[in-house]
Image (cartoon, rainbow, N blue to C red):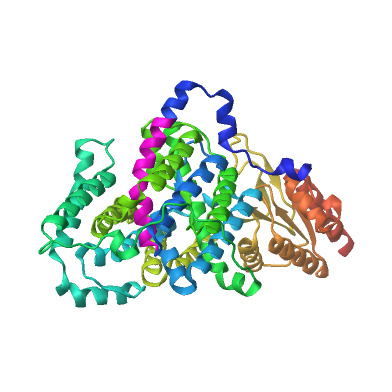
């Protein structure tokens, strides 16, 4: 019972329904219908760009979108396939096939659920912004590069997956541009770009698909001798109109080991994107996301969709903002959006066959432009050099190599960056003869303590973790002029101590004792003291040598020093 009560899983849907009314239902239904219409072309485009069929893209949006709204921790989050996953999904399919993608997505879902169960939702938010911007911009450029073939009608097959070889193939084949295809793409692009200038409520992508598909069909019927463009039906055949039957997949340790890096990438990317979307939504609506519940909800969605052939699911910022703009305020809007997509899938799927691939390429190019965040990148270039280098490294790794490497090294950079900044902000001070108790505090009244000769005071101003432990040891040795009789280690600002800090502290105490030097700890916080006692430091040093205030520590150290001097006379 205690384990269940500690799980932070409280879907927003259930709390929202407690005070639900008809007015709220009308607003949610309206928003859900609009979002469903907006999500349609994106689901199709993301499915095709990821290397699967449009059917799979829609199925993912239907099932994943429903799960995210039903189990998630944000009131307005809209889930589904997103552009961020295109690169990783395409690479997984290229290496391991659809079966490998299903296993990787399932494992990513399990990882997301575990992140939520272990209450790591808030930690994900602390990934440095330059890393997020770097791999998001890298993904945007990669998505853009995958659409060149369909946008210009080059007619290429088996295009290399790597960025540089891919562009090499493009440059060698730009002489094969299809003018009808290029004109179709440019018209679609113009409609998407100009629609918001007419009305921000009109879905430009959907409008482009309807108008361009209609025009392409008529031109193909009446002017076939000069107008011919490739459509979804030409490449994928007739689209199915039934939700795929659930199917299983085989799991073994060899497969798990092989696909774990990809699953980890999907999980981290999904967590970052969904929580980033939720944070943006909270800023607009004033609500508060339960990050752990959101991760569990995203995990449930990603555990479920592979059984129906789906691709990874996460929160989609653009669709979530569309939901908010049109009045959606509860997860009911997200559920309605999934039902709208289901109805389109069941009754209008045959019409999808006539959509030109050049039109979808235009949709994805606009998506990649919006993802790139070039204004943010320009802003970061005014930041410290360390942030700029992290952004550039993450961007280049994403583009030149792949997203898995970029996220793994990006997270490593985040850890190193964090440690570097903590170490830069953590000071180790040395005192002798006199010590001002009020130094480093807001107290206006200064109290100066006289420190006896032979007593050295070392203050650690910050957490005592593995990076600082070595720094403290080096500092103490470099400032040693003559062997002291007593060492006071002032720990009033040590908020936590890790295993390396404990180990170094234990070595310091033992080596000091071997040299006949007493060690007194001062200002130890209750939580830190518990850790010290659990590690047996109190037994090693003597419980009375761990003081809660510097005054007591200095008095004790002075008495010890006087006693030692007296015995030496």
Q: Which residue lies furthest to the right in this view?
A: 567
Residue 22, given in percent of the width and then of the height, sits at 48, 21
Question: Viewer-proximal residue, 368 or 229?
Answer: 229
Q: Main secondary structure of the magenta part?
A: helix
Residue 427, given in percent of the width and then of the height, sits at 58, 55
Above or below residue 207? Residue 352 is below
Question: Viewer-proximal residue, 72 or 501?
Answer: 72
> In the picture provided, is 150 more to the left or to the right than 469?
left
> In the picture provided, is 440 more to the left or to the right than 369?
right
- Residue 47 colored magenta? yes
Residue 65, given in percent of the width and then of the height, sits at 48, 45
Above or below residue 36? Residue 155 is below
Please report the residue visible at 61 percent of the width from the left and 52 percent of the height from the top: 113
Dividing the image into 4 quarters, which one contains the N terminus? top right
Please report the residue visible at 46 percent of the width from the left and 39 percent of the height from the top: 334
Please report the residue visible at 16 percent of the width from the left and 61 percent of the height from the top: 182
Question: Viewer-proximal residue, 375 or 430?
Answer: 375
Residue 157, given in percent of the width and then of the height, sits at 30, 74
Please report the residue visible at 31 percent of the width from the left and 77 percent of the height from the top: 165
* First to last magenta residue range: 29-50
Residue 468 appears anywhere in the view: yes
Residue 133 appears anywhere in the view: no
Above or below residue 458? Residue 98 is below
């Amino acid at each position: 019972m205690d384990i269940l009560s500690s799980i932070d899983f409280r879907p927003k849907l259930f709390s929202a329904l407690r005070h639900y009314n008809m007015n709220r239902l009308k607003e949610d239904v309206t928003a859900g219908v609009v979002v469903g219409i907006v999500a349609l072309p994106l689901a199709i485009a993301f499915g095709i760009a990821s290397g699967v069929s449009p059917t799979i893209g829609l199925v993912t949006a239907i099932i994943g979108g429903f799960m995210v709204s039903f189990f998630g921790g944000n009131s307005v989050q809209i889930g589904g396939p997103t552009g961020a996953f295109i690169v990783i999904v395409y690479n997984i399919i290229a290496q391991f096939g659809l079966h490998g993608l299903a296993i990787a997505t399932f494992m990513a879902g399990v990882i997301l659920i575990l992140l939520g169960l272990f209450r790591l939702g808030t930690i994900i938010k602390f990934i440095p912004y330059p890393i997020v911007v770097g791999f998001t911009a890298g993904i945007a450029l990669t998505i853009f590069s995958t659409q060149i073939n369909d946008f210009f009608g080059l007619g290429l097959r088996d295009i290399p997956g790597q960025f540089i070889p891919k562009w090499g193939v493009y440059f060698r084949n730009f002489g094969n541009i299809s003018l009808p295809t290029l004109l179709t793409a440019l018209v679609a692009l113009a409609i998407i770009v100009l629609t918001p200038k007419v009305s921000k409520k009109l879905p430009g992508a959907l409008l482009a698909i309807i108008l361009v598909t209609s025009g392409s069909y008529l031109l193909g019927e009446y002017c076939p001798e000069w107008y011919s463009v490739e459509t979804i039906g030409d490449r994928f055949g007739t689209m199915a109109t039934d939700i795929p039957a659930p199917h299983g997949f085989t799991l073994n340790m060899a497969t798990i080991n092989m696909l774990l890096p990809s699953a980890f990438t999907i999980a981290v990317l999904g967590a970052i994107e969904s929580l980033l979307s939720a944070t943006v939504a909270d800023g607009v609506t004033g609500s508060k996301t339960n990050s752990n519940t959101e991760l569990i909800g995203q995990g449930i969605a990603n555990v479920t969709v592979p059984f129906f052939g789906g691709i990874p699911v996460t929160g989609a910022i653009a669709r979530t903002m569309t939901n908010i703009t049109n009045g959606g305020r509860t997860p009911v809007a997200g559920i309605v959006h999934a039902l709208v997509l289901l109805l389109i899938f069941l009754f209008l799927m045959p019409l999808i066959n006539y959509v030109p691939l050049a039109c979808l390429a235009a949709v994805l190019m606009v998506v990649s432009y919006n993802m790139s965040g070039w204004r943010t990148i320009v802003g970061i270039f005014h930041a410290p050099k360390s942030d700029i280098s992290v952004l550039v490294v993450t961007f280049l790794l994403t583009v030149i190599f792949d997203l898995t490497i970029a996220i793994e090294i990006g997270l490593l950079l985040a850890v190193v960056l964090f440690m570097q900044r903590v170490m830069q902000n953590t000071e180790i001070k040395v005192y002798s003869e006199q010590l001002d108790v009020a130094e480093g505090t807001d107290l206006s009244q200064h109290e100066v303590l006289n420190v006896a000769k032979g007593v050295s005071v070392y203050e650690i101003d910050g957490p005592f973790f593995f990076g600082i432990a070595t720094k403290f040891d080096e500092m103490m040795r470099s400032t040693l002029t003559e062997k002291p009789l007593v060492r006071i280690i002032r720990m009033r600002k040590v908020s936590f101590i890790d295993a390396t800090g404990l180990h170094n502290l234990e070595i310091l105490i033992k080596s000091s004792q071997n040299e006949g030097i007493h060690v007194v700890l001062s200002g130890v916080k209750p939580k830190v003291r518990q850790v010290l006692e659990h590690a047996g430091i109190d037994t090693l040093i003597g419980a009375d040598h761990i003081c809660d205030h510097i005054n007591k520590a200095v008095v004790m150290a002075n008495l010890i020093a006087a006693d030692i001097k007296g015995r030496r006379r």
